[in-house]
Image: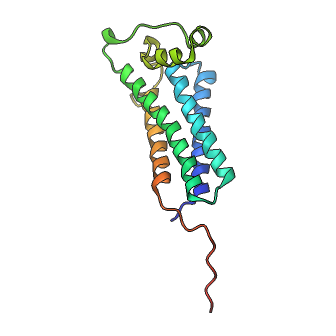
Amino acid sequence: MQWSYRFVNGFLFLASVLGMAFALYLEHGQGLQPCPLCVFQRIGLMGMGLISLLALLHNPASNAARRSYVFLASLSILWSTAVAARHVWLQNLPPNQVPSCGPGLDYWLETLPLKSVFQQVLTGSGECAAVDWSLFGFSLPVWSLLFFACLLLICVWQLLRDYPFLTHKPAKKR
């Protein structure tokens, strides 16, 4: 079965919406406040979803334009995957090696330049090492990493695959 470019982008957009809906359910329905790394993971997921939606709606005719959209979506979800991997790593550090908790993300955004905020968040804080939710023995960052890795694989496949000729072939004569 040949999956169309639009179908795959629609799937990626839908996956982004479902991922964000689950994150917002955990935050507002279950009361789990996202740590700074969780917020950064959401940014990449939303970026991939937005780029996939634009690609779905635009449906460019040229392979170069199609690959440009997919490349940007891949970079965005790669960001989420990398941040989730860092988050899993932080959660698996021995307790004596976990970085100390710093001020919240809101405070950093108000007082520090954006570059410093990124540095502070990506070096991790103690609040990111806490395991507040798990399913089948795996923490939320582990599940997020698996989800983002699957989306990244789909994006890379979409980037590297051959697209069928975009021109219509004449119908066969009888």
Up/down of 93 relative to 143, above or below: above
**Is any part of residue 135 visible from this angle?**
no
Across and down, in percent, residue 24 comes to 62, 27
Q: Is residue 48 left or right of residue 92?
A: right
Up/down of 58 relative to 114, above or below: below
Q: Nearer the viewer, residue 112 or 8?
A: 112
Question: Considering the image in quadrants, where does the C terminus appear?
Answer: bottom right
Residue at screen point 58% across, 57% down: 5
Residue at screen point 63% across, 22% down: 28
Up/down of 23 relative to 50, above or below: above
Residue closest to the far bottom: 174
Q: Nearer the viewer, residue 125 or 51?
A: 51
Up/down of 29 relative to 53, above or below: above
The colour style of the image is rainbow
Marker count (numbered): 0
Q: Nearer the viewer, residue 170 or 63?
A: 63
Quadrant housing residue 19: top right
Across and down, in percent, residue 51 comes to 61, 42
Q: Is residue 101 left or right of residue 39?
A: left
Residue at screen point 45% across, 54% down: 160
Residue closest to the far right: 57
Across and down, in percent, residue 119 comes to 47, 17
Across and down, in percent, residue 112 comes to 56, 10
**Is any part of residue 171 visible from this angle?**
yes
